[in-house]
């Protein structure tokens, strides 16, 4: 990891210099290392696995109705510009003999969000991971996020919001189940 940090630090120093700045001036001397550490933190999802993250937090349960976990904050980096997108994730699942520990939903969201991503793929990865670990009859995931690549550059649209959804199993097969989920996550 130290070799990786050193290489990233050197790369950030070069980027700063290629932008026309003096990487040795007072305000920038430590910036390459800080930026390298920040990038490692922002992409720490590559160092995690679903099995390690879930860590046996799956419990027997007779619950077979919809479970919704709403407004899970997420922070990710767009794989196209390396700029942040920030938003919320809403998850529902229909347990089938097993439930997942509540904090694991946020951890799963973070693991996939802390990788270079596009929102469309992130939504699917979260849904498929929850389906895989719970064996649920259905999983639904909706993400709504603002993308700095659209706000800070390009078209510079400050109030744009992207929404993506993935519906698996019962949520894909039943309009009523899908509608119940979408109604439950509507803002109050």
Image: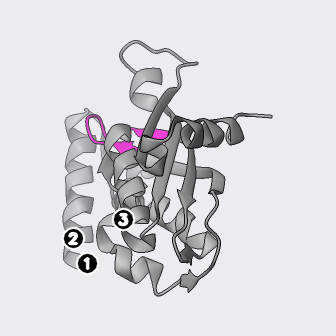
Where are the magenta residues, as a range?
Answer: 77-86
Query: Which of 165/106 is in front?
Result: 165
Q: Is residue 170 above or below residue 53?
A: above
Q: Which labelled disc corresponds to residue 115?
A: none
Q: Mark 1 packing: few (<14 Cα in 10 Å), some, or many (20+)? A: few
User: Residue at the spot x=25%, y=35% of the render?
Assistant: 80
Mark closest to the chain's N terminus, 3 or 1: 1
Tag 2 residue: 4
Q: Are marks 1 and 2 in contact (CB under 8 Å)?
A: yes
Residue of label 3: 45
Classify residue 184 as left or right of residue 58.
Answer: right
Residue at 49 percent of width and 14 percent of height: 157
Q: Which residue is mark 1?
A: 1
Report, in whole angstroms, how far the alpha carbon at label 1 lies from the one at label 2.
5 Å
Q: How far across and how far down the image is residue 76, in percent?
A: 43, 48
Question: From the viewer's perspective, is the residue at label 2 or at label 3 nearer?
Answer: 3
Helix, strand, or loop for circle 1? loop
> Mark 3 or mark 2, which is nearer the start of the sequence?
2
Q: Is residue 81 magenta?
A: yes
Q: Quadrant of residue 45?
A: bottom left
Q: Secondary structure at mark 2?
A: helix
Q: Position of residue 47 (x, y in %)?
A: 31, 73
Q: Crowdedness of circle 3 by 10 Å Cα count: few (<14), some, many (20+)?
A: many
């Amino acid at each position: 990891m130290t070799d990786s940090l050193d290489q990233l630090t050197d790369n950030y120093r070069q980027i700063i210099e290629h932008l026309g700045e003096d990487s040795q001036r007072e305000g920038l001397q430590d910036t390459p290392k800080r930026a390298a550490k920040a990038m490692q933190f922002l992409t720490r999802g590559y160092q995690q696995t679903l099995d390690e993250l879930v860590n046996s937090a799956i419990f027997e349960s007779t619950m077979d109705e919809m479970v919704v976990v709403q407004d899970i904050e997420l922070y990710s980096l767009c794989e196209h510009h390396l700029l942040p997108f920030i938003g919320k994730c809403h998850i529902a699942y229909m347990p089938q003999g097993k439930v997942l520990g509540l904090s694991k939903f946020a951890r799963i969201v973070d693991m996939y969000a802390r990788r270079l991503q596009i929102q469309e793929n992130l939504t699917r990865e979260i849904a498929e991971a929850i389906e895989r670990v719970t064996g649920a009859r259905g999983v639904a995931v909706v993400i709504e996020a603002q993308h700095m690549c659209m706000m800070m550059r390009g078209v510079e649209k400050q109030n744009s919001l992207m929404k993506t959804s993935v519906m698996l199993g019962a949520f894909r097969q039943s309009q009523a189940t899908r509608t119940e989920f979408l109604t439950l996550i509507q803002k109050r």
